[in-house]
Image (tube, helix red, strand yellow):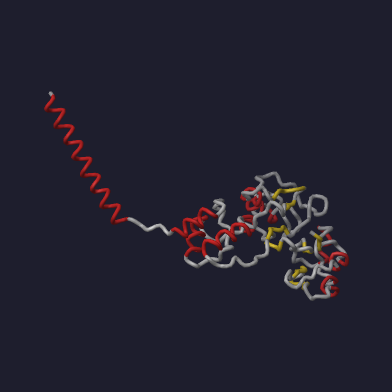
Amino acid sequence: MITGIIIATLVVAGAGIIIGMILGVADMKLHVDVDEKEQAILEALPGNNCGGCGFPGCSGCAAAIAKGEAAVNQCPVGGAPVAKAISEIMGVEAGEAAKMVAYVHCQGDCEKATSKYEYNGVSDCRLMTQAPGGGAKTCSFGCLGGGSCVSVCQFDAIHVVNGVAVVDKEECKACGKCIEICPRHLIDLVPYEAKEVVSCMSQDMGKFVNQYCKVGCIACHICEKNCPSGAITVENNVARIDQEKCTHCGICVTKCPKKVIKAV
């Protein structure tokens, strides 16, 4: 009886030693050196894994920065503080990067824009575009108000207000998720410091815009003609502002007859 126990113990111990040796050899063969700089960068990143940097999560971003394949200010969520910390790790200057925020180029809410019918389906803009006529809203370029952008925002920075998505610029981290999911491509990034923004993306002719929206761009060119810095052009029946040229004089805001250009 005792002999059997001793033999069993020796067998188990021997098996354990053999397995340990195998694992030790495997570890030596498969060992991957950890880049201490990459690890330090990963720890400096916020850890949201939102993909706003253009890489698959924070680990992908950290690896790219460590290899010199991405800028130290690549993370839009971390902003200047994270960029500064990473620049110290990399031993380079962080550089100045303008803070960006998402903006929804539409203000055609339930009172200002008309609808063709009442939609009672699932509140998802991607599905709503499959409804008859491409959605209930008469304007085929306007915000559908289904909240697809809201569902992907990790920072509670965007909400549907009276049928139109609105971004809270103080909460927005410019991750770009809302931009990717909007089926009508109404959202893009604008400088946080931007003072004037065109709140319309309709490419319809002015006479049609007037029929379905009180605050839609009618391509009258008044803003373009009155801009002293040449920052505004009208393309495809809608005004566009070059924020790099804009001097924030505010003339376009006061001259726009439809109040499409907003001071933000």
Q: Residue at x 23, y 40 (%)?
A: 16
Q: Is 23 in front, or is 227?
A: 23
Q: Could you tell me residue 121's position as x and y percent?
A: 67, 45
Residue 245 on image: x %, y %: 75, 73
The quadrant of the image that shows the N terminus is: top left
Q: In the visual, does 204 lie left or right of 187?
A: right
List x then y, in percent, for residue 116: 76, 52
Quarter of the figure with residue 263: bottom right
Q: Which residue is drawn at 76% across and 56% down?
A: 138
The residue at 50%/67% (across/down) is 69
Judged left or right of residue 138, residue 98 is left
Q: Residue furthest top?
A: 1
Q: Return the residue nearer the eye: 97 or 258.
A: 97
Quadrant assignment, res 180: bottom right
How many numbered circles does the render carry? 0
Question: Where's residue 244, x and y in %?
Answer: 72, 71
Quarter of the figure with the C terminus = bottom right
Q: In this view, does 13 lie above or below 73?
A: above
Given residues 211 and 16, the one toward you in this image is 16
Query: Is 220 placed above or below 143 here?
Result: below
The residue nearer to you, when weighing 180 against 220, is: 180
